[in-house]
Amino acid sequence: MRYTLSVAICVIVSLVLLAIGTRYVHPHWTLATIYSLQLHAAAACVVAMLAALVLKRHFFFAWLLLAVALLFTGHAVLMGREFAEPMTVSDAGAPTFRLLSFNILSTNYAKGEDITRTILSSGADLVNVMEAQPLRVYMDELSKTYPYRVGCGVMIRDCDQLMLSKVPIETPVVRTLSDIFPDRFILAKVTIAGRTINFAGIHTTKPYFDNFHSLELNRAALALTETNGPLLLSGDFNASSLAPNMRRFLRVTQLKTGAWEPATWPTRARGLGVPIDHVFARAPLKIKSVTRLPDAQGSNHYGLIAEIAVTGQ
């Protein structure tokens, strides 16, 4: 019985590791979710293999699978650090501003007023909201603090992708990245902390909808690479930075993460969830800090609040 159970665990783990391993040979969109979950999945395989070894200690194949699981876990940790660009001592005096990015869930009308209060009390200079339908009736109130916006009737008829700003939004551009959802990419310029920056918000479709996720990232990358100078991008990417197409996107756009990316989904997992909502910055901008809002306020994502430093001044 112990041997049979150990073999069963090994079979399941081998299939999971095989799925993860395809990313190193030929990534495929059908396995995109497990690529994003590599750290979680590989760590779970490590625990499973330790259990298998307790059941049948001298089973050679179990030791081999444990080694592979440890390798994939370690590589996931290294990949998570590859695009991190932490602050340095020389950046200590750099001026900063604040960004709020939050997918509030399109059906979350019961919490619309609470979310409005959260935005107004956040101290954020710039705000990106995804699935912003619950905020439509609060636009007049929000405009008292954020007089400039794109979305909810300004350039975008619907209240889905929404950009709010305390400072003028210059030359805004709205793009549809695929046929799945319209108008989910906004790119503009704002002058803040004494510097004109490119400011963008995005909401990509889920990675298991055929190859649309990669298509959307490619189109967003083309738009972003046409910009010069500082760039700040935030939004719901529905994928972690471990996914192969996300890593390609970051390389092409030269965007960096903060020192740590907080888990944002699913909310019930709290700190053990997956960071699929991101804040990315391109030099001379650096992410001084990025933290998760303490309350999801009825959404299935946690919001993010980021302190952005304008370095090299």
Image: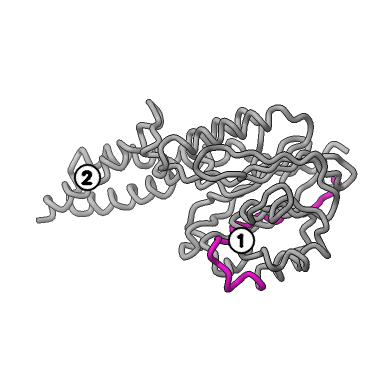
Q: Position of residue 139 (x, y in %)?
A: 74, 64
**Which residue is drawn at the image coordinates 81% and 53% (left, top)?**
148
Q: Circle 2 sits on which residue?
A: 10
Q: Earlier in the sequence, mark 2 or mark 1?
A: 2
Residue that carries the numbered disc 1 in the rendered image = 133
Q: Amino acid at mark 1?
A: Gln
Q: How crowded is the residue under tag 1: few (<14 C-alpha within 10 Å), some, or many (20+)?
A: many
Left/right of residue 282 with respect to residue 134 in the rendered view = right
Q: Position of residue 154 (x, y in %)?
A: 74, 51
Q: Which residues are magenta?
A: 93-113
157 in relation to 90, above or below: below
**Residue 89 shown left or right of residue 86 in the figure:** right
User: Residue sitting at 80 percent across and 40 percent down?
Assistant: 189
| Camera-nearest residue between 168 and 285 | 168
Amino acid carrying label 2: it is: Cys
Task: Give the colour scheme of this rendering.
Answer: one colour
Q: Is residue 48 left or right of residue 195?
A: left
The residue positioned 66% from the left and 64% from the top of the image is: 135
Instruction: Please name which of the two marks, 2 or 1, marks the residue nearer to the observer.
Output: 1
In this rendered view, identify the residue nearer to me: 84 or 33: 33
Answer with the quarter of the image where residue 91 lies.
Answer: top right
State the image coordinates of residue 45 (x, y, percent, origin top left): 33, 47
Residue 258 in view (yes/no): no
